[in-house]
Image (tube, helix red, strand yellow):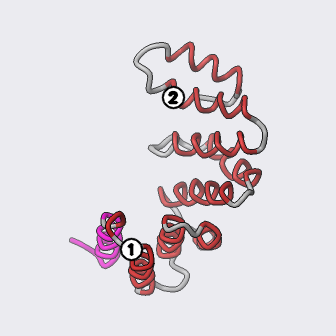
Amino acid sequence: MSTPDDAWEDRVATLWATFEVRAADDFVARIEALAAERPADDAAALFERGCAQDSTGHPAEAVGLYRVALAAGLGGIRRRRALIQLASSLRNLGQADKSVALLTPELDTPSDELDDAVRAVLALALADVGRAREAVGISVGALARHLPRYQRSMARYAAQLFPRSP
């Protein structure tokens, strides 16, 4: 049996599926309308609003919304997505040091489908703060798991450059 929350989530997912064919302002307006159906402090709605701003080229607006969503108790996979997207937006705004600080602890969280995204954004941020060797290490470490051969050797090389690489 579908709940009102499920129906809202379905409508959000359906709207995101049309992102590429909508004008940015139309898309943001539609996300805002969906978010307005929820309480003002609804973490999921705040997160979706942040995503819409981020995806339409407004990272500064997204940063505030991601922070408020996290403070409102955003959980599950959206919490990790918010951290990744917040870190990416901060990096894009010239605050790569904050991006590194946000994502480094994520290396110690339980594994999920976003592990490589964490590592990709962290690698970019590390490069931006002048830690290119570590950035290469984390990138090679993430890539090593997907190679048909040389996984162990690439993982060892990665660990030499970034000791926390998987």
C-alpha distance separating marks 1 and 2:
35 Å
Dot 1 crowding, Cα within 10 Å, few <14, some 14–19, many 20+:
few
Q: Amino acid at mark 2?
A: Leu
Q: Which residue is mark 1?
A: 23
Looking at the rendered structure, the kind of residue marked 1 is: Ala
Residue 105 vs 3, above or below: the answer is above
Residue placed under numbered mark 2 in the picture: 143
Residue 5 image-quadrant placement: bottom left
Q: At numbered mark 2, what does the secondary structure look like: helix, strand or loop?
A: helix
Q: Is residue 126 above or below residue 45?
A: above
Report if residue 133 lies within the magenta region.
no
Q: Earlier in the sequence, mark 1 or mark 2?
A: 1
Label 1 secondary element: loop
Residue drawn where x is 71% and y is 24% of the image: 161
Q: Quadrant of the N terminus?
A: bottom left
Residue 62: x percent and y percent?
59, 69
Label 2 crowding class (10 Å Cα cut-off): few <14, some 14-19, many 20+? some
x, y percentage for residue 132?
A: 72, 33
Assign the C terminus to one quadrant of the image.
top right
